[in-house]
Image (cartoon, helix red, strand yellow):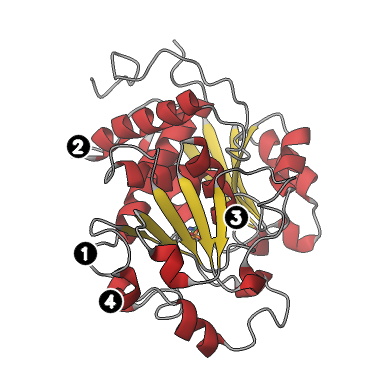
Amino acid sequence: MTENSLNENQGIEAVSWNRKHLLDIDDFSTSEFDLVMKTADVMKDVLSRPIKKVPALRGKTIGTLFYEPSTRTRSSFELAAKNLSADVVNLAASSSSIAKGENLIDTVHTLEAVGVDVLIMRHPIAGASHLAARYAKSSIINAGDGAHAHPTQALLDMYTILKHKPCIQGLKIVILGDSRHSRVARSNIWGFTAMGASVTLCGPRSLLPVGLTGQHAVYSNIKLETDISLALDGADVVMALRMQKERQSAGLIPDIREYVAQFRLTSERLAAARPDVVVMHPGPVNEDIEISSEVASGPHSVINEQVSNGLAVRMAVLYLITGGNKE
Ligand code: CP
């Protein structure tokens, strides 16, 4: 591998990624997952060098358009684009003409008029990135739309698991907490079950999603469980979720102390999982609400690794979506 090319015998299969947009991973094939994982490995190698920069996206302009706060996703996408030598323009809704009333489609067209090729977008409304993609000439990457989807988070979570387990097939993965309002849970369920894991969603009934199981369910291999000790029994991976207070209607959690008493991931509870259990959290963490600080910083935790891997995975996504693997 030379610093000037990612196209020379990198272990990236010569398959083209025929996606213009990345809106969710619900229609990913297993070979597409593999391609992203392998490409992320190449990017991880780039990130291990003294100069973490390759010219793969030289001449491209990447825009970030965030209508909601973000630390991890936005900073890692920005760094990913810069590491690939793209130009970057960052737009926060609060400090742009959106605050003067400019609508989403006009904002997308305005960014395209200044040369944006790929637009990374976070929005509080589910489906907003699909709407943008319908009108966009540029590629849209969904960086989180309401409670609907967060595809690059799911890809980096899968990538992180694969750094600790030989494969995802056959794993028991527990997603703990507010899965009803979680776009991370929704995208991860697609990825984990597509790769052959069984997924248990655990939490109070009011925070578990409706319509995921049963006759008309679109997902398969999913179980809902309100008893945390049954859920954690024999788990290979436990992912605690942030309490999505900004998306909850009133009354779903009568008392946060009650939730903490019954569902916080503690060392005692984690003892029911497998000895080599991997503990994850997409962040940001509400310390000592959904997970104890002892578990969050303990030997099973890969929370910081998830953030680091996010950079490699987002470099891979940008590289693939701009046709980086096509000669
Ligand atoms: N996991 C995640 O999306 O974090 P940010 O909100 O900080 O981007």
Residue furthest to the left in view is: 50
Q: Nearer the viewer, mark 1 or mark 2?
A: 1
Amino acid on which disc 1 is placed: Pro
Image coords of residue 89 (percent x, y)? 55, 45
Q: Alpha-carbon neighbours of circle 3 within 10 Å: few (<14), some, or many (≥20)? A: many
- Residue bearing mark 3: 183
Q: Earlier in the sequence, mark 3 or mark 4?
A: 3
Q: Nearer the viewer, mark 2 or mark 4?
A: 4
- Residue bearing mark 4: 294
Structural distance between the alpha carbons of marks 2 and 4: 33 Å
Quarter that holds the N terminus: top left
Q: Residue at x 32, y 69 (%)?
A: 270
Structural distance between the alpha carbons of marks 3 and 2: 33 Å
Q: Earlier in the sequence, mark 3 or mark 2?
A: 2
Secondary structure at numbered mark 4: helix
User: Ligand 1 near label 4 (Cβ, under 8 Å)?
Assistant: no
Q: Residue at x 38, y 16 (%)?
A: 13
Q: Do tag 3 and tag 2 residues touch (Cβ < 8 Å)?
A: no
- Residue bearing mark 1: 299
Q: Earlier in the sequence, mark 1 or mark 3?
A: 3
Structural distance between the alpha carbons of marks 1 and 2: 27 Å
Q: Earlier in the sequence, mark 2 or mark 4?
A: 2
- Residue bearing mark 2: 49
Q: Residue at x 45, y 21 (%)?
A: 324
Amino acid on which disc 4 is placed: Glu
Secondary structure at numbered mark 1: loop
Structural distance between the alpha carbons of marks 1 and 4: 9 Å
Viewer-closest of 122 and 215: 215
